[in-house]
Image (spheres, coloured by chain):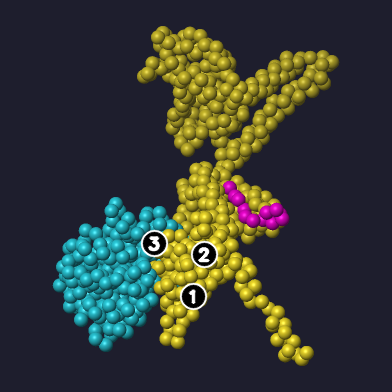
Chain colours: A cyan, B yellow
């Protein structure tokens, strides 16, 4: 069972969930390049300019560990990253589990993704603000120390997105991606877990996923918010177990 | 009342509810689903809501911008799950009227025995002012950066070397010209490299005057020789002024180094010229004074009267010499100001050559041999051109006294020019001095021969010929003699 963390996080987010499965499955968790403890030198803004670059991360983990016959659980944007990986190498995956997925975050004509472009600009600005807090980064840059301030100090709050520029690019790639056309290409059976009150991935998006995927099961959780694996780990574990049974 | 009772009494006077409500920052608490369960008056005032409009009605994400909501779900909430406290997260709050204000939020979490998240307690600090300062500071920084790059652009453009130094005198910026001159790499200012190119005899001066300027804060100025790319030392004027703050403390030094080699050598030449000119004038004036004194002495004696014609002749010669020297000086001044006017007429070159220099032919020491086509004509200022010829011939007499024949030749050359040459068979001019003979104040420094004059003659000749649109030059082989020549446009 392979767990792929979502945007803005790293593999720590799975702590509560894997407790429910480690007795029955071999568990693999990992950090994408640019997240958590990954080697930032391996980051290439060109490779990670599309979600496909992250899909290659998954396939490289599979290759390195010789994984096959796996269940891949992806949270948030990792649902789509996992889907891309499974479209490319379906034989490696027996089932996919999508936790709060969205193939398209922006509203587009009749399609309801939940966000307008200006919402995202607002988010990007917020990210800047929270990375470039006065005390940590702006002051030294104004005082003329052009050397980059210590990232470790700056990012005490942002345990996952280690480098602000990588985080910014990942945010753009995530929120501006459109993977609706990839949904029908998935041959692997899948489960969509959608929360009942998630502004990032609203229930409408869950229904859209379900309608456009082959062999998909949709479950709406009682849990609210975008992180049921953290806020309601038991319900999440039970829903996954019920599907796998 | 005993002490414990007193403390209990005093404690009872503290009103936590009032402190909570009226704190200068906002307080609120919410459940993991975001449901707000308590909020203080300060935050209510900031938001413009009544208490009952929020409590158990709105969620935290209802009070923040839409971008903030994404941030809440993707960053903030996962952080709350993993940490016991999350500090200094910047959210934009949205007031009831739709307006926004930026705030920093510090949050602590309350967990159950099983470590389940139960509630979040948060403090809110309005950072509107700070944001404004930040924006202004950023703007100021942008402006300063733009100014800086403008300065660097300009300073790279200037032919002088420009540099700045810290108050302690350490170089911290040099322009492109400076880097190129001292072959410094892009980022390093290597003092050893710079010092290496300062003339060994100027290094002490450069350093000691710099140290003195730094100690006193007074403007810095010195002249040193620097080694240029061609391997020659050139004179530079090194100057620096101190930038001072309002308290009069030096903040930095702004410096410039200018090549003043031409200037310095010109002054050296002028000094030499003045000494030569004084000397030259002094000789005939002394002779004249001598003649006059003798006339004064002998004017009443019979035998003295006989000496008068010779003394008068001597006085006359001295006066003519003085007159020549002064004319040369005046001519130079006119030339310098570009005031030479030409009075041109049609001139038969053969007649010009024949009539020129009667003083030389009359003396009978030197023979002028003239070769010229009878029909050659030029349009020129007769007196000026004659002046050039006389100068050439006089030079031949002066510098080649043993060359008894002087050849004056005129011939048509290409481009419809007439070339007029004056050749002697004297010692010639060394090749390394040839390029300078037409320079102002230049005198062929040939110690083996007597010479006199200001070194202006050939300079004036060159100016006259140039003014006529002709060329002037000299060919010389040491031991073979020299040929001074000039060309004039032919009249057809």
Q: Residue at x 51, y 69 (%)?
A: B55
Q: Look at the image and give the residue range highlighted in magenta.
A: B245-256
Task: State the mark number for residue B344.
Answer: none
Pointer 2: residues within 10 angstroms few (<14), some, or many (20+)? few
Residue B198 pos. (x, y %) = 55, 53
Q: What element carries label 3?
A: helix
Tell me the subunit letter for badge 3.
A
For residue A151, side relative to residue B357 (left or right): left
* Residue B304 % position (x, y): 79, 17
Q: Which residue is drawn at 69% across and 82% down?
A: B12
Q: Vertical placement of A235 versus A165: above or below? A: below
Horizontally, residue B98 falls left or right of residue A222, namely right
Q: Distance between the residues labelled 2 and 1?
A: 20 Å
- Judge whether residue B250 is colored magenta: yes
Mark-to-mark CA distance, 3 and 1: 27 Å
Q: Residue B120 carries which label?
A: 1
Quickly name the residue at label 2: B53
Front residue of B14 and A57? B14
Across and down, in percent, residue B5 comes to: 73, 89
Whether residue B388 is situated above or below residue B61 in the rendered picture: above
What mark, if any, has residue A168 been given in the picture?
3
Residue B2: name its quadrant: bottom right
């Amino acid at each position: 069972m392979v767990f792929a963390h979502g945007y803005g996080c790293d593999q720590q987010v799975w702590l509560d969930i894997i407790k429910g499965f480690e007795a029955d499955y071999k568990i693999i968790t990992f950090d994408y390049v640019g997240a958590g403890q990954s080697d930032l030198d391996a980051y290439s803004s060109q490779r990670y300019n599309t979600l496909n670059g992250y899909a290659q991360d998954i396939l490289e983990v599979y290759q390195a560990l010789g994984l096959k016959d796996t269940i891949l659980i992806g949270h948030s944007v990792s649902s789509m990253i996992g889907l891309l990986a499974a479209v490319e190498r379906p034989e490696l995956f027996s089932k996919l589990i999508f936790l709060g997925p969205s193939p398209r975050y922006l509203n587009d004509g009749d399609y309801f993704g939940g966000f307008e472009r200006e919402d995202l600009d607002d988010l990007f600005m917020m990210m800047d603000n929270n990375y470039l807090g006065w005390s940590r980064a702006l002051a030294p840059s104004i005082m003329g120390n052009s050397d980059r301030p210590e990232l470790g100090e700056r990012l005490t709050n942002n345990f996952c997105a280690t480098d602000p520029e990588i985080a910014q690019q990942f945010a753009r790639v995530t929120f501006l991606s459109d993977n609706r056309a990839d949904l029908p290409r998935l041959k692997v059976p899948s489960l969509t877990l959608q929360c009942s009150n998630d502004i990032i991935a609203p229930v409408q998006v869950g229904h859209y996923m379900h309608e456009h995927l082959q062999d998909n099961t949709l479950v709406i959780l009682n849990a609210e918010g975008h992180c049921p694996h953290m806020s309601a780990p038991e319900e999440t574990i039970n829903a996954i177990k019920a599907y796998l049974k | 009342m005993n002490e414990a009772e007193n403390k209990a009494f005093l404690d009872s006077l503290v009103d936590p509810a009032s402190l909570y409500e009226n704190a200068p920052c906002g307080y609120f608490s919410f459940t993991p689903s975001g449901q707000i369960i308590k909020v203080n008056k300060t935050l209510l005032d900031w938001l413009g809501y009544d208490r009952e409009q929020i409590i158990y009605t709105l969620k935290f994400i209802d009070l923040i911008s839409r971008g903030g909501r994404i941030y809440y779900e993707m960053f903030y909430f996962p952080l709350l799950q993993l940490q016991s406290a999350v500090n200094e997260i910047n959210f934009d709050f949205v007031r009831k009227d739709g307006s926004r204000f930026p705030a920093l939020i510090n949050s602590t979490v309350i967990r159950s025995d099983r470590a389940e998240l139960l509630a979040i307690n948060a403090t809110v600090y309005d950072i509107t002012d700070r944001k404004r300062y930040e924006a202004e500071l950023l703007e100021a920084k942008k402006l300063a950066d733009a100014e800086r790059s403008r300065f660097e652009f300009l300073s790279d453009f200037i032919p002088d070397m420009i540099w700045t130094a810290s108050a302690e005198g350490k170089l911290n910026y040099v322009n492109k010209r400076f880097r190129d001159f001292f072959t410094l790499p892009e980022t390093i200012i290597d003092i050893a490299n710079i010092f290496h190119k300062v003339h060994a005899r100027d290094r002490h001066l450069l350093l000691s005057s710099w140290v003195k300027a730094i100690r006193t804060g007074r403007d810095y100025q010195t002249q040193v020789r620097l080694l240029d790319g061609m391997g020659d030392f050139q004179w530079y004027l090194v100057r620096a002024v101190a930038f001072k703050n309002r308290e009069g403390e030096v903040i930095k030094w702004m410096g410039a180094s200018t090549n003043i080699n031409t200037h310095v050598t010109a002054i050296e030449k002028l000094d030499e010229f003045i000494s030569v000119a004084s000397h030259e004038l002094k000789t005939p004036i002394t002779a004249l004074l001598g003649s006059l004194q003798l006339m004064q002495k002998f004017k009443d004696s019979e035998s003295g009267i006989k000496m008068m014609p010779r003394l008068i002749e001597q006085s006359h010669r001295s006066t003519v010499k003085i007159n020549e020297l002064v004319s040369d000086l005046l001519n130079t001044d006119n030339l310098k100001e570009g005031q030479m006017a030409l009075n041109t007429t049609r001139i038969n070159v053969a007649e010009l050559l024949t009539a020129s220099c009667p003083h030389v032919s009359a003396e009978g020491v030197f023979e002028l041999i003239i070769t010229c086509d009878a029909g050659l004509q030029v349009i020129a200022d007769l007196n000026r051109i004659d002046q050039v010829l006389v100068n050439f011939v006089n030079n031949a007499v002066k510098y080649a006294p043993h060359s008894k024949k002087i050849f004056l030749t005129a011939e048509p050359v290409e481009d419809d020019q007439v070339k007029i040459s004056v050749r002697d068979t004297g010692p010639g001019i060394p090749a390394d001095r040839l390029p300078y003979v037409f320079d102002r104040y230049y005198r062929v420094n040939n110690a083996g021969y007597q010479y006199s004059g200001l070194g202006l003659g050939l300079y004036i000749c060159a100016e006259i010929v140039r003014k006529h649109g002709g060329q002037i030059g000299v060919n010389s082989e040491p031991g073979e003699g020299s040929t001074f020549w000039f060309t004039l446009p032919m009249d057809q």
